[in-house]
Each structure stands twice: as structure tokens, then as C-alpha cells.
Amino acid sequence: MLNKLEIMAWNIHGAGGYGNYAIPNFVADKILNKNVDIAIIVEFITGKGWDYLIGTLEKSYDIFISPYTSGINQVMIALKKEKGFEVKRILTENPIEKEKPEFLQVETELEGKSFAIIGVRIKTQGTNKQIDSQFEFLKDHLKTLENPNVLCAGDFNVWKTPLSEKLDITSEYIFTPEYSMVDGDFNTLDTWSAVIKNSKTTKTNVVGKALIDHIIAKGLGIKDLKYSWDFVSEKNGYGNLKPEDYKSHLVGLPDHAILSATVELED
């Protein structure tokens, strides 16, 4: 019998702790209320609000985070305790190196199925060469993984087609929610993972919707993909902003959608 897992991946806009950053309480509440089996949180940073987050989640989840360095983002992976994940190994990379992405890998086994769970964010700071080196690192890492079953999710800061080219993998292994738009106008997208500035995807070249948060999977079935913006509300600090509005100027508030999906461990 296939074991189905509910997962979420979310860039919460920690921005390296910039501007007296504090993890909003609703981040932990959202993870807990979604009741997912695996949560992959990128652009995360251990700082103010950590006590509330760990206090909210630790009874239900085993929490793994990449090392803390002041001013540098981390990655967090949360695994639901009641599922019985057996963690075998944890890997990370030096977060200071601009040639490597923000990265955390947890190798686990569940009901006899071994698979690697990877949280990743491609950094946009640095030279084009340094950014390209991050993709090269991830490409080489995915190709050399001994485990044939891989779940890699996060913010890749590129769309699906260029991601496929940069990682030299076919698009069948990259999963993004289905979308539609009118006459190639990206601001008419019916679903999106971020609203970005200085984008060449719009006629005004100022602000545009983008789909840059993805799942890469091998040996696993992925279905029911969805971007969710239901956390954007006045109560959570967004004022009168809507999901389609630019939000990255808001210090400490998530500016990416929650990417959720169902994972099937294939035979």
C-alpha cells in the first residue's frame, strides 16, 4: 500500500534577520493547522519568535535546521512525529558561501522506504557567476545522490523551464501548480508563488507575478499541487494588501505563497 504524505514548502522572508526581524506567530500556527507531514521552510532564521515557533510545533514535529550564522538565512525541515520517520543522516552546507544555495537535507526512512528530503533556496545576492554556481552545486548534488527517492522543494528564483535547463533534468521531475494566463501577460496569472519587482515578465517592467517555488521529485508521486495565500490578511500585518500585491517591502512577513502537495512513495 502506498504511503501518502502531505507536504508544504514556504519561503517566510526572514531576509537574514534584517530590520529587527521576528518570526510571525502565524507561521507556526499555519504549519500546525495545515497538519502536514513534512514542512520545508526556507529563508528562515532563528531569532525573535523562535520560542513561540518551537513551543507550538515541538509536540507534533521533529525540527531540523541548518546552522545559524548572523545575517544569513537558514532552512528548517519539520517531520510529523506520529508518522514514524526514522532519520538516518542530516547534511547541510556552509551558509556563508555565495556559490552554494541555502541547503538542508534530511535522509529518512518510512515504512521501509528510504528517501532524501531537501530544502533549498537559490540566493539572488552575488554575481551571476555565483548564482550559476549555486545551480551547478544543486545539479551535481542531485545527480550524485545515492538515494533514488528524492523530495527537494523551496524557492529556486527561476521558473520551471529555466530550472530544468540549469539543473539538466527533464521537466517531468519538476512540479509546479498548473496555471493559465491571457496573451502572455504574467499579471493575468491565475496562480503564482511570488510578486516580484524589476521583473521583465510585465509590460511595465516594475512588478509581476511569478512561479518560482517548485518541487523536484524522483521516485515519488506528486499530485494536488497548490499555491495558497490565505495568510495574507490585515490581522497578520498585511494591512489592505492582497495576494496579487507586492509584499517584499514588509519586514518580516512572508512574501511567497505556501506550496502544498501530496506525495506518494512509489513501489
Image (tube, rainbow, N blue to C red):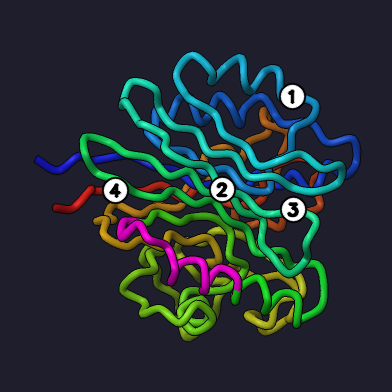
Q: Are marks 2 and 3 in contact (CB under 8 Å)?
A: no
Q: Report whether residue 228 is seen.
A: yes
Residue topped by disc 3: 95
Instruction: Report the amino acid beneath label 1.
Output: Gly
Vertical relation: 109 (above or below) 170:
above
Q: Residue at x 46, y 79 (%)?
A: 164
Residue topped by disc 4: 263
Q: Residue at x 65, y 64 (%)?
A: 122
The quarter of the picture where the N terminus appears is: top left
Residue topped by disc 1: 49
Vertical relation: 252 (above or below) 202:
above
Instruction: Report the amino acid beneath label 2.
Output: Leu
Q: Secondary structure at mark 4?
A: strand
Q: Position of residue 264 (x, y in %)?
A: 23, 48
Instruction: Report the amino acid beneath label 3.
Output: Pro
Q: Is residue 166 left or right of residue 233?
A: left
Magenta stretch: give its range. 137-149
Q: Position of residue 32 (x, y in %)?
A: 48, 24
Observer-side mark, 3 or 1, equals 3
Residue 91: image tag: 2
Q: Residue at x 49, y 25 (%)?
A: 62
Q: Along the polypeptide, which appears first: circle 3 or circle 4?
A: 3
Q: Position of residue 38 (x, y in %)?
A: 42, 37
